[in-house]
Amino acid sequence: MDKDVKKWPVYKGLEAALKDIGASMSAVSDLQNPAVKDRHWVELMHDTGAVIDISDDTTLDALLSLNLHKYEDEVHGIVSKAMNEQKIEGDLEKIDSIWRDMYFEYEAHERTGLLLPKQTETLTTFLEETQVKVLDMMANRDNAYSIVKITYWNKTLFTADKVLSLWFETQRVWSGLEAIFVLCDDIREQLPKDTDLFFEHDKEFRLLAEEMAKKPKVIEATTSQPELFDNIQAVRDGLAICEKTLAVYLETKRLAFPRFYFVSQADLMDIVSKGKMPVKVFKHLSKLFDSICNLETNQSNTELTALKMEAKDGEVVKFVSTFTLEGQVEEWLNRLLDEMVHTMRVTLSEAVAAYEEKPRDQWIFDYPAQVALTGSQIGWTAEVGIAFARLEEGLENAMKEYNKKQVASLSTLIEMLLTDLTPGDRQKIMTLCTIDVHNRDAVSKLITMKVDSSRAFPWLSQLRVRWDEKANECFVNICDAEFAYEHEYLGCTPRLVVTPLTDRCYITLTQSLHLGMSGAPAGPAGTGKTETTKDLGRALGTMVYVFNCSEQMDYKSVGNIYKGLAQSGAWGCFDEFNRIAVEVLSVIAVQVKCIQDAVKTKKSTFDFLGETIPLKLSVGLFITMNPGY
């Protein structure tokens, strides 16, 4: 086309008209969106100033008369608004259909049979997701048309969420308190006023629960009564008073049985409430003892007698003296603790006495794994002592001959592993092999270094277990430190392979304990800091509790743990100690020093957090840290 033609007014006018028609056709196409309703056409005609009849018979000419090319932005805005409004309407319809037919799931309370709504994952998820959707609608700029419905659902779901959160919390607290106040005679005697207060609110709670059971639809149950939230809150406030008093009561239980400091509040309430039904408490034994997970009992008349203790790995040990599981829960748990120690001590005494009577590969099957291992260690210490005595008498090959005996004994154990054994016996022999290898290497080192005296450091630096006939007790010596074996039942558990680094850790940690101090193994993650501490505890027959530290730990929670450790004489290993907030660490340092000072001065009781508590000198505090964490 000639360039001059483009300059003609006719050409320019035609070109502009075609562009306007193109823009108008694009706008018409957008307006065909099914989301565009009559109200949107009214809004468009208001913007354009022209009025046409919108129906199935509306012509293109009528639409073009609106001069849509002049109102492209308005058209796009109206269509976008229409689509947003349609989406909001669709979402509201879905919300309405879901929540109109959302029903509670119920479960009967174990003791009372009261129907209580369940806090299901489906209910919680739907409620959270719907609230997020409604809040998005509230923030949408095109929500004006549906704002009444949106506001209704926002208010309804907020009320439902508020009521359900409070109800499930109240229900949880009531379930815990109900079992304690109804089943525990001791509480009713100790806390008569709080018992009356609980039963008063218990009555109100049951009435509310019955009302909830009559209205299975979630929305109806939570929003039909404006005063429902206040009624539930009144019950919750009353139960909170009972909870506070109960916390003081539970503290007396912890003082009576210090290992209660290491279980959660919920677990302790469950234990105390079921204390008169020992069989129901057995599931918590693994949290209170290193390996005991169950007791074998005998029911005669009204007495329940404990006969055997069962470890997590399946090993069963018969008690030397049976005892009854009666009285308050802390009373029979203390009897269990005492009898566990008594049984392990007596069994170890018998094992030591019988050590020389038959070959070791037969002797080990007569006793539990822990006793066999400890007895074997006592035998090793005595035999090395005899070898040293012979060396001093002039028998130069005494230690070498004993080393050959060790190798032969180890070979016998290895051959036994190739035979058909039960899982428990196999683990027992594997653990013996692990320790025997270290004992063999220790003696080989003595020979290589030409050590000829039992007072030489290479021998004194070993963990030496001995049985004292006069005291009728087992002791563990290392360097100049001596520890009484604690006889915590450990089951048939494996032991760490002892490396030169492990030996050095043992020396350092035991010297620290000997001086009334604590231990702090440091090193990269996964290098065995915690496991080495636990293994040393096993070697001393001590209960070791491991606590994973976090920023949420405060001085009160850590102080309660320290209080339990000091009274029970157990060891506590605090993993990732550097995660605790710095301001909390400063208070914890004072608490640790308080315990250390009491241990150094060998006090039987000491003042801790303003309270005088008994002290067991076997307590050990350890922390582990990852450098640069």
Image (cartoon, rainbow, N blue to C red):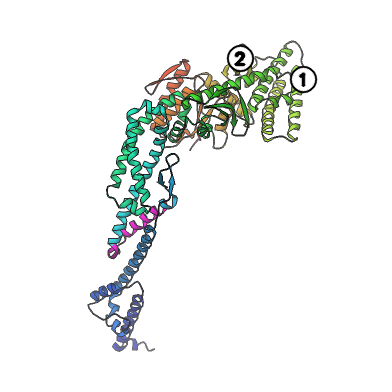
Q: In this view, does 253 lie to the left or right of 482?
A: left
Which residue type does callout 2 highlight?
Asn
Image spot of residue 114 (x, y percent): 40, 43
Give the prevailing secondary structure in the magenta stretch.
helix
Q: Which of 502 and 266 is in front in this view?
A: 266
Above/below status of 92 relative to 297: below
Residue drawn at x 37%, y 22% as measured from the top left: 610
Q: Is residue 130 inside the magenta stretch?
A: yes
Q: Where is residue 299 in the image (x, y as percent from the top left)?
A: 56, 29
**Number of other residues with Cα within 10 Å of mark 2, as a class: few under 14, some 14 to 19, many 20 or more:** few
Q: Is residue 381 visible?
A: no
Q: Note whether 438 is above or below 36 in the view shown.
A: above
Instruction: Using the image as rendered, state which of residue 511 and residue 369 is in the foreground.
Output: 369
**Is 2 inside the magenta-drawn segment?**
no
Q: Of the residues shown, which amino acid type is indicated by label 1?
A: Glu
Image marks 2 and 1: residues in contact by CB distance under 8 Å: no
Residue beneath the point at 39% across and 89% down: 1
Does residue 27 appear left or right of residue 368 in this picture?
A: left
Residue indicated by mark 2: 472
- Kindly identify which residue carries mark 1: 401
User: Does dot 2 land on a helix, a strand or a loop?
Assistant: loop
Residue 592 badge: none
Relative image position of residue 560 (x, y in whole percent): 42, 28
> Which stretch did the figure color magenta?
124-146
Callout 1: helix, strand or loop? helix
